[in-house]
Image (cartoon, grey):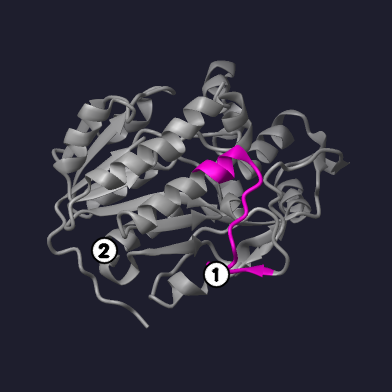
Amino acid sequence: MSVPRDDQNVKTILVSGGAGYLGSTMVPLYLEQGYKVTVYDIFRWGSASLLGILHHPNLTVIKGDVLDTPRYKALVESHDVIIHLAAIVGYPACKKEPELATALNQTCVEQLCEWLKPHQRVIYASTGSCYGVVEGICTEDTPCNPVSLYGETKQAGETAVLKKANGVALRLATVFGASPRLRVDLLINDLLHKACTMKTFDLYEPHFKRTFLHVKDVARAFLFAIQHYTSMQGNAYNVGDESMNLTKMEVAKLIEANVEGCNITEGKGTDADKRDYEVSYQKIKKLGHQTVTVTVEQGIKELLKIIPHLSESELKIMKNV
């Protein structure tokens, strides 16, 4: 089944956090598709990720905070689509700044949903961390039971989008790959950086399974939701592919095969989000979306063109510190 496109009246897109890891990959794609795109970002990690697209006449860049309610509300009201990416991402970052995490991941999203008019579209970057501990294969009908502040706040934001705004929530697999605003604190990116710099290191919970998704395929999934919104609204969708469901050690072996002299061994440690399960992605595939175009190994080879050459100052930003 392939549902028809329904974006004929969509002209303008607002991307909060548009200069970040996901946003800086999404925005060029949406400009290529002919949309007018506004990036609204506090630029906590800089603005250089947008340098390659500043020439585009349909791009507007505004420095601002989504917690600045009057300003954000005015922008929201003037756009057809709102892609809310502004967030504190991951359980370590949320634990470090719990009040900010709650404000960005939950309270701000709840307010956003109250502002929306019936014709507007909202697409929310949700996460598999909403599920918590899962036995067996995880589908969108699997009850959410988050076990970290990150999962709890993201689930609350998702609930607001689905219940208050009849929007779309995309529960993303573990994202990896190169982006104009590169991060090296994501699992695959981090392991590859360690492989290039340390060569030998321990990996905790190596048997835990994750599904991975390249950042370019994240951008494509959001584009699909923009263009097929009527068929998707009011629902959450797992975004990833069963072929990319790997244990952490299987990822480590792919890295070892591509980094000479690398040896990754089993170590100690725990994942606060308890992500260890297989996920079904049939719901979004049945709508006609091809979920994956970049494999884990292709992403590793891509990252090897830049990660070994990063400076200490670049790494500080890319580790979100």
Earlier in the chain: of badge 1 and badge 2, it is 1
Residue 55 visible, this orientation? no
Residue 319 visible, this orientation? yes
Residue 142 to residue 10: above or below: below
Q: Quadrant of the C terminus?
A: top right
Q: Quadrant of residue 142?
A: bottom right
How many marks overall? 2
Give the x, y percent position of residue 184.
59, 33
User: Label 1 belongs to which residue?
Assistant: 141
Q: Is residue 146 magenta?
A: yes
Q: Is residue 306 left or right of residue 113?
A: right
Give the x, y percent position of residue 238.
51, 62
Q: Is residue 263 left or right of residue 195?
A: right
Amino acid under label 1?
Asp
Q: Quadrant of residue 72?
A: top left
Give the x, y percent position of residue 304.
60, 40
Give the x, y percent position of residue 291.
47, 65
Q: Residue at x 70, y 47 (%)?
A: 258
User: Label 2 belongs to which residue?
Assistant: 227
Residue 167 to residue 149: above or below: below
Q: Quadrant of residue 164?
A: bottom left
SS under mark 1: loop
Task: State how far apart marks 1 and 2 are (Cα).
Answer: 24 Å
Of residue 234 and residue 227, the one placed in the foreground of this image is: 234
Q: Give the residues in magenta.
A: 137-153
